[in-house]
């Protein structure tokens, strides 16, 4: 029995269940972005802000609410347009303002004379190079330049102040650079007392966990996206209710739990995930955590 279970697992549980690909991977694949009412509204409003070149947008959300996946979906949408120039920062930790500005110059592939060594330039010179680039792209070329920062709660006050200065680059009609900050809720605690920064926020939105209806819709959406070819209802309504209770509607937790129960479904050679199977997985995880702590 153990050998058979291991063989099933090695084949890939999702193919044995009739999927073309894994339905509940936790990687931020934009193709698996579930447009709940909240997520769809946030993404739509964000795209409008970017097209209008309003400047600074902030998306907040607790861990696992789907910020990173929405960020990848945003990049996917931007890739469809030729008038967008964008760069994404995944780990926004910089030792100094000079280091941050140099990173922007390099990542936006800003042309500089070969005789110039960026390391020898001061902050004012680096800002000037960026401003000249923004003027060329937005005014002369009519393009939109965007800087998207994920995990923005890691930004220190000095870097936030640098972003504020960059937002001062503007015409009478619009900002020369569009900045999107996506971060956990502690980001708000960092910026709430920075009046000059808060005043520049054009759009702010907080993502919340899903309700039970959207939890079911998320599960069904990912099953369909993964090319499910079976006829059975994989998750009973009672199982979905239990998944919602256990995950509190956090998309990342939903995906992780669904991944585990589908693997267990194959191992136990069952057709449908029921409440009992979900509870078995939860109890097993809790027992493992207790043993690890001891």
Image: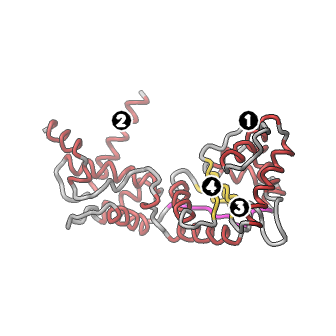
Say which residue label 4 marks.
182
Question: Of tags 1 and 2, which is closer to the observer?
Answer: 1
Q: Which residue is mark 1?
A: 95
Q: CA distance from mark 4 to mark 2?
A: 33 Å
Residue 184 in view: no
Looking at marks 3 and 1 on the same chain, the residue that comes earlier in the sequence is marked by: 1
Tell me which residue sits at (53%, 69%) in the image: 40
Q: CA gap, disc 3 to disc 1?
A: 23 Å
Which residue corresponds to mark 2? 288
Q: Residues within 10 Å of mark 4 (few under 14, many from 20)?
A: many
Q: Position of residue 293 (x, y in %)?
A: 43, 30
Mark 1 vs mark 4: in front = 1
Frontmost residue, 181 versus 100: 100
Q: Is residue 57 visible?
A: yes
Specify the quadrant that holds the C terminus: top left
Q: Residue 134's x, y, as percent?
A: 76, 58
Q: Secondary structure at mark 4?
A: strand
Count neighbours of disc 2 (C-alpha within 10 A) and say few if under 14, some if 14 to 19, many if 20 or more.
few
The answer to whether mark 4 and mark 2 are in CB contact below 8 A is no
Mark 2–mark 3 distance (CA, rounded to whole Å): 46 Å
Identify the residue under disc 3: 178
**Image color mode:** secondary structure
Earlier-in-chain disc, 1 versus 2? 1
Q: Are marks 1 and 2 in contact (CB under 8 Å)?
A: no
Q: Secondary structure at mark 1?
A: loop
Which residue sits furthest front? Answer: 114
């Amino acid at each position: 029995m153990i050998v058979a279970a291991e063989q099933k697992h090695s084949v890939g549980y999702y193919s044995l269940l009739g999927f073309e690909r894994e339905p509940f991977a936790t990687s931020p694949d934009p193709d698996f972005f579930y447009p709940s009412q909240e997520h769809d509204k946030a993404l739509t409003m964000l795209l409008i802000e970017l097209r209008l070149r309003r400047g600074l947008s902030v998306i907040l959300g607790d861990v696992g609410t789907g910020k990173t996946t929405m960020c990848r979906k945003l990049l996917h949408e931007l890739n469809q347009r030729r008038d967008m120039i964008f760069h994404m920062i995944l780990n926004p930790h910089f030792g100094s303002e000079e280091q941050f500005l140099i990173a922007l110059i390099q990542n936006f592939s800003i042309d500089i004379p070969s005789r110039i060594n960026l390391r020898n330039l001061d902050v004012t010179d680096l800002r000037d190079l960026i401003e000249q680039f923004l003027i060329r792209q937005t005014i002369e070329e009519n393009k939109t330049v965007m800087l998207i920062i994920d995990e923005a709660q890691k930004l220190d006050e000095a870097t936030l102040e640098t972003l504020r200065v960059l937002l001062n680059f503007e015409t009478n009609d619009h900002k020369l650079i569009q900045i999107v900050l996506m971060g956990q809720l502690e980001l708000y605690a960092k910026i709430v007392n920075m009046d000059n920064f808060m005043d520049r926020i054009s759009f702010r939105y907080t993502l919340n966990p899903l309700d039970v209806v959207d939890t079911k819709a998320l599960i069904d959406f990912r099953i369909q996206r993964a090319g499910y070819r079976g006829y059975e209802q994989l998750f009973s309504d009672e199982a979905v209710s239990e998944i919602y209770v256990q995950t509190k509607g956090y998309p990342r937790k939903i995906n992780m739990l669904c991944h585990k129960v589908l693997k267990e479904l194959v191992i136990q050679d069952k057709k449908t995930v029921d409440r009992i199977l979900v509870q078995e997985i939860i109890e097993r995880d809790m027992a493992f955590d207790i043993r690890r702590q001891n």
